[in-house]
Image: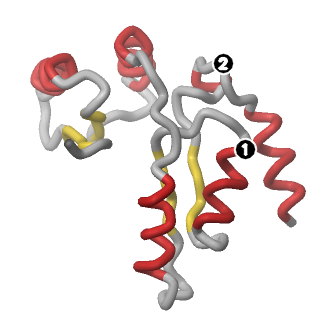
Amino acid sequence: MSKGCHVIKLGPNNDDAAREALQESPQFLQVGGGINDTNCLEWLKWASKTLKVLCGIDELLVSKLFEWTKDYDDLKIVYAGGAKSVDDLKLVDELSHGKVDLTFGSSLDIFGGNLVKFEDCCRWNEKQG
């Protein structure tokens, strides 16, 4: 079974259908589209009720992302999903030879998480130069 599939809201009044899809496939689907500064808190609160586990970095995928794009110097990639430690920054950097950037979501303290501190991520980035 695939990991990290998305439900994208493409028009108005899709919220109920998106919530229903997410409810039917917990730990499988993510939602996107139409989420902005006026409604993101609602989605964050809803997600915090349903989120049960952080699956970690898909190391094979990160390695493949480097392999598939190593000849494209101007292309940058951002990996999202599963990061649960500031050490994941080093892991993704090493696996991708610096090609892939990592973003943190629900594990980050500024998004309500308790696994990763924003300040620690900033310090790690500052050390990278």
Which mark is first along the chain, 1 or 2? Answer: 1
Q: What residue sits 13% from the left and 39% below the top?
A: 11
Residue 97 in picture, x, y percent from top left: 64, 73
Location of the C terminus by quadrant is bottom right
- Find residue 87 and name its label: 1
Helix, strand or loop at label 1? It is helix
Please tell me whether mark 2 or mark 1 is closer to you in this view. Answer: 1
User: Which residue is nearer to you in this view: 17 or 69?
Assistant: 69
66 vs 50, left or right, is right
Q: What residue sits 48% from the left and 28% below the top?
A: 54
Location of the N terminus by quadrant is top left
Query: Can you say whether 98 is above or below 29 in the image?
Result: below
Query: Can you say whether 48 is above or below 89 in the image?
Result: above
Quadrant of residue 34 within the rendered picture:
top left
122 vs 100, left or right, is right
- Find residue 114 and name its label: 2
